Image: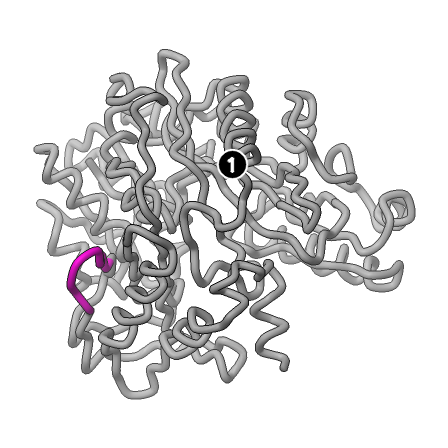
């Protein structure tokens, strides 16, 4: 198994592969030469300099490494090439198994403008918006009047919270359209955008899916990812607090039916917005393993990466929907090398102290250890702290205790740990009244 990624997700995949008796190959850039995930694999191949476009995103180098080492399969993790249908086709052309959905399925769900129409046809509730990509500023302005302000402009090929802008009137829409199309072209290589009505006080809920080649699709409950900044998640939890049981069952059923309709295989998530009235609308499908997948693993006891590998090998899922059991509550806190007081400015540097917490119900996924350098070239994620407890209140207390124990220091390195503890202690979080806009509103007080 060649792991076409880096950091904590590469290390996490390598660990499951080792448990399953699979030999592993790491690919690494110059910046990651001494990284933990490299040492964890049986073989390692240098694929280029630090910039991702010349290493982790450079398909010829990744494929050459797979062929040179005799890799049978490639696991792309999340980000980078994980949702690249062309890369999956190249893998197939070289006789290499891509761990993920088939290329045609990835294409069907990867264009967020097209999948929105596809899900509407499948019977899922969607927000008022464009039926496909918006072709010009004039069309955007016409749609803005039709949909009603505020509206949100999104990159059709976007992901990771990038390529999203809110417009509250015609003038803002003109600028939002210009900036989003430019960024989408630069970052994703596709300048297409689409529009939806913007819901300002919503919760972000995603359903974890797994499917196999027999047509079986199951869900493993939902996660609430509403504590965000700049559309990027800070804290995720499962199950979603205050979600009525009837809504929970409906979202799971929606997600399974829609995924089965498009022939989805492997791991993925169906994402929804839940407005203040409790109505849920489809948002997008992420055709990959998610950063926050450990939350579901803690709640269900299912190794999602192991299930991905079974499906990729042509096997059936190891359990049925009836065998899925969700127990207790789990919370994940993303610890980033960022300074919240300086607008979440990245703070790369060498970790002179790195002492993760332990104890019952505590899991830390990280690609770093003391003495390692957090490079400036990639995402600023240092670690994911995940806790489980019998109740949500106990999980919150356990997360705070673990964060208090977590020691991360280095010259110029700031982290999100203090902010995460602040957020966990707020009454709004305890009562689960927060929405996707809460962090921005809290920081502006």
Is residue 102 or residue 221 the one in the foreground? 221
Q: Residue 133 appears at what percent x and percent y?
A: 73, 38
Q: Nearer the viewer, residue 423 or 96?
A: 423
Image location (x, y in percent) of residue 104: 50, 23
For residue 316, above or below residue 405: above
Local SS, label 1: helix
In the visual, does 149 lie left or right of 122? right
Q: Which residue is mark 1?
A: 245
Q: Quadrant of the N terminus?
A: top left
- Is 23 situated left or right of 214 in this image? left
**Magenta segment: does it hold 3?**
no
| Magenta part, dominant SS | loop
Residue drawn at point x = 64 percent, y = 42 percent: 156
Decide: few, some or many residues near mark 1? Use Cα within 10 Å; few <14, some 14-19, many ≥20. Answer: few
Where's residue 411, x and y in %?
A: 28, 88
Which span is picked out in magenta? 357-364
Compare residues 91 and 172 and report the one nearer the observer. 172
Classify 207 as above or below 46.
Answer: above
Q: Which residue is at 48% across, 59% downward?
A: 233
């Amino acid at each position: 198994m060649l792991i076409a990624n880096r950091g904590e997700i590469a290390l996490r995949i390598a660990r499951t592969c080792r448990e399953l008796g699979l030999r592993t190959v790491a690919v690494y850039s110059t910046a990651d030469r001494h990284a933990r995930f490299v040492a964890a694999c049986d073989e390692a191949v240098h694929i280029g300099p630090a910039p991702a476009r010349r290493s982790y995103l450079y398909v010829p180098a990744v494929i050459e490494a797979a062929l040179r080492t005799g890799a049978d399969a490639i696991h792309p993790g999340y980000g980078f090439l994980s949702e690249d249908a062309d890369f999956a086709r190249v893998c197939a052309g070289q006789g290499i198994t891509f761990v993920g959905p088939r290329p045609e399925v990835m294409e069907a769900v990867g264009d967020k403008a097209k999948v929105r129409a596809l899900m509407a046809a499948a019977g899922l509730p969607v927000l008022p918006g464009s039926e496909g990509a918006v072709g010009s500023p004039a069309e955007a302005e016409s749609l803005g009047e039709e949909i009603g302000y505020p509206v949100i402009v999104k990159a059709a090929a976007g992901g990771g919270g990038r390529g999203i802008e809110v417009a509250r009137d015609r003038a803002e829409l003109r600028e939002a359209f210009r900036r989003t199309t430019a960024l989408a072209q630069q970052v994703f290589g596709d300048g297409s955008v689409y529009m939806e009505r913007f819901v300002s006080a919503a919760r972000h809920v995603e359903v974890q899916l797994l499917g196999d080649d027999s047509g079986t699709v199951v869900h493993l409950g939902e996660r609430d990812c509403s504590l965000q900044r700049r559309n990027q998640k800070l804290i995720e939890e499962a199950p979603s607090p205050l979600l009525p049981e009837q809504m929970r069952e409906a979202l799971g059923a929606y997600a399974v039916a829609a995924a089965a309709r498009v022939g989805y295989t492997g791991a993925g998530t169906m994402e929804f917005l839940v407005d203040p009235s409790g109505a849920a609308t489809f948002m997008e499908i992420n055709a990959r393993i998610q950063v926050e997948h450990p939350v579901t693993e803690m709640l269900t006891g299912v190794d999602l990466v192991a299930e991905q590998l079974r499906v990729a090998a042509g096997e059936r899922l190891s359990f049925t929907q009836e065998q899925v059991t969700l127990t207790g509550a789990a919370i994940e806190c993303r610890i980033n090398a960022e300074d919240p007081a300086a607008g979440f400015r990245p703070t790369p540097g060498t970790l002179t102290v790195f002492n993760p917490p332990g104890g019952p119900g505590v899991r830390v996924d990280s690609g770093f250890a003391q003495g390692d350098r957090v490079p400036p070239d990639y995402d600023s994620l240092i670690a994911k702290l995940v806790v489980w407890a019998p109740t949500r209140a106990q999980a919150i207390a356990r997360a705070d205790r673990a964060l208090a124990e977590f020691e991360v220091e280095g010259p110029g390195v700031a982290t999100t740990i203090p902010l995460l503890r602040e957020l966990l202690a707020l009454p709004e979080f305890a009562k689960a009244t927060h929405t996707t806009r809460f962090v921005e509103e809290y920081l502006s007080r």
